Image: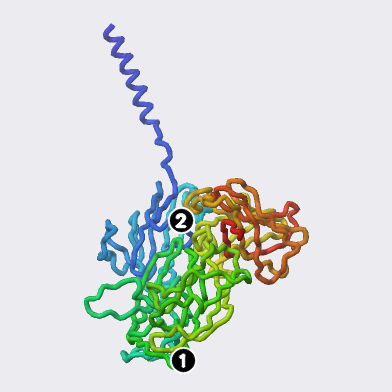
């Protein structure tokens, strides 16, 4: 019996040994994957001398390398967020087989980072760039040799370097000098921002009062400012001031930057030899105060209501008060006895010799000067109202089979507008702020129980065929629309579209150009959207 058990054991042992000698390991896995710290945009963006990391996540690669260009350094990791000093490694090398690389970019412009992988099997990379999914397959270069060769485009933004010109009476000032620039009260200097290095997206000119030692700064120290590249700034206050230029770079997926330069030459504003006159636009404020700007500071005065006439829709209204502005002595604050409504047309006149400037000039009379009415756009931001983020909050709508774009081809104001276009074979071109009520479109809650008035600017290209065509602005959550017939609208010029939206909370907008026949050739641009709650004078 023991002998039988021993034979059986030997037989089983032989079977197991035989299985082991004939065993083949399963094929090893081949797969491609990579990651970079800057996201999935088509062109990666980084500031000069800053870094980003790249990691090869591939499996089963039989050869692998990263290749960089001159002007790019390999850095030693890990790097903490607050680190400002970096250690360069592999100096002079442009190739590494490390799986993860941290790269510093020291040359402005476009740099290329190349990832080269070889596999023994075919592989496919499943990627997403600018929210668009795509597939990239490998290329066979030899038996059991498949290559995926990927080049990352990196835009390196240069350091901001403000460059500017200041002119007085059309003559450029020597800004290397430290001599004082003398300006009469009410006169202007012309400021030109010529900055291109670093690709700034905005700038601010600021005129600030020079303070005595030990005096704390306050917002009222800024007596003039402008946000345009070309700006005429009027100097109304007597005193000594400094001008500065601040340039900024900001936007979706681009590195932010900020730089301020203070101009060497102080500006001294002296009494004017010119008449004391109205200067600038009369504006209604949110609290219904009407602010009237002048070319100089006012000397103290008492009641002057009787010297002013205010007409509302052609009818003379009673004035409650006329006072000097508490923060700016070049501005008068005027208040009416009655309430002001948004559609009102208001004009102001002055006739008298009572008001004088601090340098003893008599204010000149003026007649029926219009008031710019205060108007709160409930859309709130330039990104929502004017597409000024370049396509961050407004996106192509999912059902759009034609381009729905935010671009800089034809803005009405600012730098961007929306472009909707259809050609034969396409049904819908549309953009939206969805998801509803999300960060792209904070909910607008109706405050007055009055309907909304919505307006926008629209431009239809001259070659567009608009016969029988229409577009619409859908308001969410109702998904009803402000319908616009395109056939009776002008072409080749900007015009205003006006509509009404019923009372309710708004959680999003959706602009759509559609043609079910797919026979349309239409291109239009949209800009300067505005939503307000309707006001009507009783």
* Sooner in the amino-acid sequence: mark 1 or mark 2: 2
Between disc 1 and disc 2, the foreground one is: 1
Q: Is residue 36 above or below residue 22?
A: below
State the image coordinates of residue 204 (x, y, percent, origin top left). 41, 74
Q: Residues within 10 Å of mark 2 (few under 14, many from 20)?
A: some
The residue that appears at 27% across and 66% down in the rendered structure is 88
Q: Residue 24: which quarter of the image?
A: top left
Q: Which residue is label 2 attached to?
A: 40
Q: Which residue is label 1 attached to?
A: 274
State the image coordinates of residue 224 (x, y, percent, origin top left). 41, 78
Q: Residues within 10 Å of mark 1 (few under 14, many from 20)?
A: few
State the image coordinates of residue 112 (x, y, percent, origin top left). 43, 66
Q: Spatial distance from mark 1 to mark 2, Cα to Cα?
A: 60 Å
State the image coordinates of residue 98 (x, y, percent, origin top left). 33, 56
Whether pointer 1 and pointer 2 mark residues with C-beta atoms closer than 8 Å, the reply is no
Q: Nearer the viewer, residue 388 or 60?
A: 388
Q: Is residue 1 above or below residue 454?
A: above
Q: Quadrant of the N terminus?
A: top left
Check residue 25 in the rendering and tell me which mark sits there, or answer none.
none
- Which SS class for mark 2? loop
The residue that appears at 39% across and 63% down in the rendered structure is 67
Residue 270 seen: yes
The residue that appears at 39% across and 66% down in the rendered structure is 256
- Which SS class for mark 1? loop
Q: Is residue 83 above or below residue 5?
A: below
Q: Residue 503 vs residue 292: left or right?
A: right
């Amino acid at each position: 019996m023991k002998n039988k058990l021993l034979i059986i054991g030997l037989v089983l042992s032989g079977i197991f040994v035989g299985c082991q000698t004939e065993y083949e390991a399963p094929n090893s896995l081949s797969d491609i994957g990579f990651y970079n710290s800057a996201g999935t945009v088509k062109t990666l963006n980084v500031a000069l001398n800053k870094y980003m990391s790249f990691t090869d996540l591939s499996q089963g690669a039989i050869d692998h390398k990263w290749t960089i260009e001159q002007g790019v350094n390999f850095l030693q990791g890990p790097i903490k967020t607050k680190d400002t000093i970096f250690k360069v490694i592999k100096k002079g090398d442009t190739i590494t087989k490390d799986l993860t690389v941290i790269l510093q970019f020291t040359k402005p412009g476009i740099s290329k980072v190349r990832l080269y992988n070889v596999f023994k099997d075919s592989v496919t990379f499943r990627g997403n760039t600018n929210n668009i999914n795509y597939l990239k397959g490998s290329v066979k270069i030899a038996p059991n040799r498949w290559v995926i060769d990927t080049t990352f485009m990196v835009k390196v933004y240069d350091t901001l370097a403000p460059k500017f010109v200041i002119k007085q009476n059309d003559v450029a000032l020597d800004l290397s000098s430290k001599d004082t620039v003398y300006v009469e009260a009410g006169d202007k200097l012309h400021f030109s921002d010529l900055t291109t290095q670093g690709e700034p997206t905005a700038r601010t000119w600021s005129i600030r009062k020079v303070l005595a030692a030990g005096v704390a700064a306050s917002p009222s120290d800024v007596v003039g400012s402008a946000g345009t590249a070309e700006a005429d700034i009027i100097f109304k206050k007597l005193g000594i001031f400094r001008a500065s230029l601040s340039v900024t770079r900001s936007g979706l997926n681009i590195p932010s930057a900020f730089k301020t330069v203070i101009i060497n030459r102080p500006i001294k504003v002296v009494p004017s030899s010119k008449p004391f006159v109205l200067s600038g636009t009369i504006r209604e404020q949110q609290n219904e105060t009407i602010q009237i700007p002048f070319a100089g500071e006012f000397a103290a005065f008492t009641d002057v209501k009787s010297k002013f006439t205010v007409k509302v829709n052609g009818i003379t209204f009673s004035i409650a008060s006329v006072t000097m502005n508490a923060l700016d002595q070049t501005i008068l604050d005027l208040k009416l006895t009655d309430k002001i409504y948004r559609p009102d047309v208001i004009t102001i006149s002055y006739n008298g010799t009572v008001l004088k400037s601090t340098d003893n000039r008599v204010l000149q009379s003026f007649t029926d000067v219009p008031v710019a009415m205060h108007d709160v756009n409930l859309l709130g931001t330039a990104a929502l109202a004017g597409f000024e983020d370049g396509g961050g909050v407004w996106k192509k709508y999912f059902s759009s089979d034609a381009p729905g774009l935010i671009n800089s081809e034809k803005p009405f104001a600012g730098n961007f507008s929306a472009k909707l276009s259809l050609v034969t074979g396409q049904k819908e071109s549309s953009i939206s702020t969805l998801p509803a009520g999300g960060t792209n479109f904070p909910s607008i809650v109706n405050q007055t129980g009055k309907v909304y008035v919505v307006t926008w600017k629209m431009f239809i290209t001259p070659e567009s065929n608009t016969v029988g065509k229409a577009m619409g602005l859908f308001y969410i959550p109702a998904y009803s629309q402000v319908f616009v017939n395109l056939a009776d609208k002008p072409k080749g010029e900007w015009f205003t579209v006006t509509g009404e939206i019923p009372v309710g909370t708004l959680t999003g907008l959706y602009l759509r150009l559609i043609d079910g026949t797919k026979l349309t050739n239409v291109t239009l641009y949209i800009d300067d959207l505005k939503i307000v709650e309707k006001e009507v004078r009783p």
